[in-house]
Image (spheres, rainbow, N blue to C red):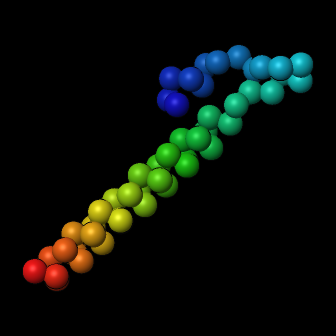
Amino acid sequence: ANFARWEPPHGKFGIGHPWKQYLKVGAMTRKCAYCVEALDACIRSHSK
């Protein structure tokens, strides 16, 4: 999504895509995945 910001607006209304929001969603998803991985590692270490 970083390289797509230059893309011109589309459609008859000339509305561009919300690239900054896509970047925020990607960052939050990545952070959530890190937390899930940490939780999984914690659960696996306690089950041994």
In the rendered image, the vertical position of residue 11 relative to residue 18, given as above or below: above
Given the current orientation, which residue lies at the most extreme left position? 48
Given the current orientation, which residue lies at the most extreme right position? 12
In the rendered image, the vertical position of residue 34 relative to residue 47, given as above or below: above
Pinpoint residue 46: horizontal percent, then vertical percent.
16, 82
34 lies left or right of 5: left
Q: Residue at x 68, y 36 (%)?
A: 18
In the rendered image, the vertical position of residue 13 relative to residue 47, given as above or below: above
Pinpoint residue 14: horizontal percent, then vertical percent.
84, 21
47 lies left or right of 4: left
Using the rendered view, name the quadrant where residue 7 is placed.
top right
Q: Residue at x 50, y 29 (%)?
A: 2
Pinpoint residue 4: horizontal percent, then vertical percent.
56, 23
Using the rendered view, name the quadrant where residue 45 is placed.
bottom left
Q: Which residue is drawn at 34% across and 59% down?
A: 34
Using the rendered view, name the quadrant where residue 36 is placed.
bottom left
Q: Residue at x 43, y 61 (%)?
A: 32
Quadrant containing the C terminus in the rendered view: bottom left
42 lies left or right of 22: left
Count of numbered marks: 0
Pinpoint residue 3: horizontal percent, then vertical percent.
50, 23
Given the current orientation, which residue lies at the most extreme front position? 48
In the rendered image, the vertical position of residue 22 relative to residue 27, given as above or below: above
